[in-house]
Amino acid sequence: MQRPNIVLIALDTQRADHLGCYGYSKATSPFIDSIARRGVLFERCYAPNIPTHPSFTTMLSGKEAMTHNIVNIGGGAPIAEGIRLLPEILKKQGYATVAVDSMGRHFSRGFDEYIPYTWDRSDPRVLRKAEAVNAKALPVIQRLSKQEEPFFLFIHYWDPHTPYLPPPAYRRKFYPKDRDPYDPENHSMDEAWTWEPFKWYFHDWMPGVTDAEYVVNLYDGETAYMDHHLRTIFAELAPQLQDTLVIITADHGEILNEQLGYFDHHGLYEGNVHVPLIFYWPGTMPRGKRVPGFVQNLDLAPTMLELAGILDHDRMEGLSLLPPIFGLRDGNYDEVYLSEATWELKRGLRTQRWKFINSLEPDRHGRPMQELFDLQSDPQEQRNVVAQYSDLAQGLASRLDTWVARRLAETGRKVDPLQTQGICGTKIGTPRPGELIGAGATPLHERKQAQAATIPAPEALQAPNEVTDEAKGVKLHGYVKR
Ligand SMILES: [Zn+2]
């Protein structure tokens, strides 16, 4: 068989359950849904290591974070020595490799061409992110389609990532016409406006908003805008789809207003760790197949290598997705182990029914050190039942400990890298002393451009950095605007 082209489309921050094909009631994703109907959808794919940089490293290395060493964003720790990423292996085996991506760091490894993009910031109320990505990706597809050798193309979209500033047609698409985002009587944003680490950042791009539903609508608007522009990519790929596997997934999801996460992706809750995964390869893969069991984005790289007929799997830790795709088993795992270390230091265990989360240190939302959720009766993870089911919780805690001990032994470590690297997110946004924050602040559309144009660019947020706050004489880590 001829080796297939592979197109990996990553939708940064897209939670699974806000897509129609994952049961969402709003029409955020008609195009992605149409692809899912003609392809294979994994109902329960998990991102074990969040957020962005840990997750993409897991996805592209086929190895878990304890092995590859990238446990947070902005902490600056390097990828472990000897790790080879998927594009490096594909390139060595004769694939043309191109990325349209802005992450930099080790993510550029193995690509013949690594093509970054920036957002047009001339209108502070709108970021046409998907269009900027497509402007770079479409000429690449045209060029690659004329080449003899198979290609691997990685395209990274950021639309559902904050700031949520979709074009005007999407700004109120999922918001009732008679509702006011700035209603002073609405207090659903009060908690977010008092959370120190993020409040000035929110003030940059959604000043004065009091209705959390409006912000959720903006998130969904971003998805709908991105979904619309994915059509163009598939249209360009159309002549080659018989020989091309297209994968749509996300590095992590987003907490909206259902947890103390406030429009960000910290917390090992379902909104963050349950991600979409769709395989589309007409004529070769099943049509309309839904895989019900647990899989992880750890499984992507070994699966792509298998489909490319490449035997060098570099001791990847993920499992092939082909048996579940072709119905030989329901999924790849009975349970999934989770970690995060950017804004808080946590490990978690997701079983068929339960979610257990263990904090390695107190978090900044003041949540309990241990949380247990019964996902059967409480899928939104609203009721911590750790006291009610203390035996069960201790059983899960010891399973998590055993798993960590095993991973330490396998990776030759003495100490958990979550402990040695710690958190690196401290605060985000620019304080403007004297400005009203929350209800009553001047809305973005009424602000002067000069004031509003300070919204940080995604590349500024994601890059590893270390900045000193001169006034206070302290070091700021991670998500600090440069
Ligand atoms: Zn991300």
Image (cartoon, grey):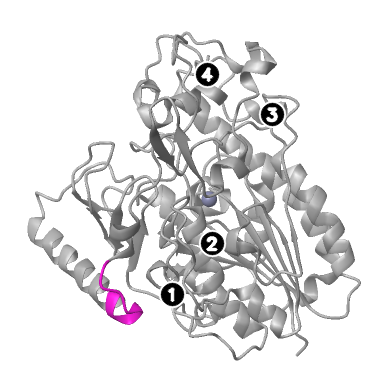
Q: Mark 3 points at which residue?
A: 126
> Could you say where residue 284 lies in the image, as x and y percent from the top left?
70, 79
Give the Cα distance between marks 3 and 1.
Answer: 40 Å
The answer to whether the residue labelled 3 contacts the one labelled 1, judged by CB atoms less than 8 Å apart, is no
Q: Which residue is drawn at 73% across and 24% down?
A: 123
- Say if mark 3 contacts mark 4, CB within 8 Å: no
- Which residue is depicted at the point 89% across and 65% down? 143
**Is residue 461 depicted above or below 92 in this figure?**
above
- Mark 3 vs mark 2, foreground winner is 2
Q: For mark 1, what is the residue?
A: 331
Asked if residue 413 is among those painted magenta in the image, a careful observer would answer yes
Q: What residue type is labelled 2?
A: Phe
| Nearer to the camera, 63 or 72 | 72
Give the magenta-colored segment's residue range: 408-415
Instruction: Give the Cα distance between marks 3 and 4.
Output: 14 Å
Rounded to the nearest angstrom, the CA distance separating label 4 from label 1 is 44 Å
Residue 56 numbered tag: 2
Per the image, the residue denoted by label 4 is 207
Density class for disc 4 (Cα within 10 Å; few <14, some 14-19, many ≥20) is many
Indicate if the residue with disc 4 has its beta carbon within 8 Å of ligand 1: no
Question: The disc labelled 4 sits on which kind of residue?
Answer: Pro
Residues tagged 4 and 2 counted as in contact (Cβ below 8 A): no
Q: Is residue 411 above or below residue 140?
A: below
- On screen, residue 317 versus residue 205, left or right, reads left
